[in-house]
Image (cartoon, helix red, strand yellow):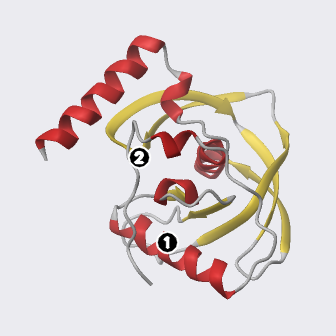
Amino acid sequence: MAIREILVVPDPRLKLKSEPVTVVDDELRALMDDMLETMYDAPGIGLAAIQIGVPKRVIVMDLARGEDEPEPRYFVNPEILWSSDETQPYEEGCLSIPEIYDEIERPAKVRLRYLDYNGKQIEEDAEGMYAVCIQHEMDHLEGVLFIDYLSRLKRTRAVAKVKKAQEAA
């Protein structure tokens, strides 16, 4: 396993649409292991492959808190089958947009289908933090960042703030 570099706005690769995975094999599992290690190191709760420069439809996530036992999750070719009309605001942040947080309104519940770490197809419902996180990460697979939901002014300020911090580092 290896910690990979996380792309940061305004890197144009973050706007790429990710390609479907054709087979879950050892090479893909190695990528998911690297992604998980990178996410934990950051630290974060979710990471899409495109955030480390790999345009594949792969996400890792762990919503365990603090001292809780880690609960890593793996999503290959995830798709939302249904989303509720009811929405829920949640303050989101992103490892590719460090130190920027804003409230985003998303469907409160979703039903999703994906392949797990071993290539087994799973269908399940998500709500609360799980629903927010999976929708946020799936947006990455389409080249969409959470700041794309903000006004142009807020988005421009967020990118400028990240660029300034990167230059100062």
Considering every residue shown, the one lying at the far left of the view is 168
Estimate how packed mark 2 is, as few (under 14), some (14 to 19) or many (20 or more) residues with alpha carbons within 10 Å. some
- The structure residue drawn at horizontal position 67% and vertical position 51%, both measured from the top left corner, is 18
Nearer to us in this view, 27 or 129: 27
Q: Earlier in the sequence, mark 2 or mark 1?
A: 1
Q: Which residue is mark 1?
A: 36
The image quarter in which residue 73 lies: bottom right
Where's the N terminus, which quadrant? bottom left
Q: How many marks?
A: 2
Q: Which mark is residue 14?
A: none
**Residue 52 place in picture, x, y as percent:** 47, 60
User: Is residue 60 shown above or below 15?
Assistant: below
Q: Amino acid at mark 2?
A: Ser
Circle 2 SS class: loop
Q: Image point 37% across, 45% down: which residue?
A: 8
Q: What residue is at 59 percent from the left and 36 percent from the top?
A: 144
The amino acid type found where label 1 is placed reads Leu
Specify the label residue 96 is tagged with.
2
Q: Nearer the viewer, residue 109 or 100?
A: 100
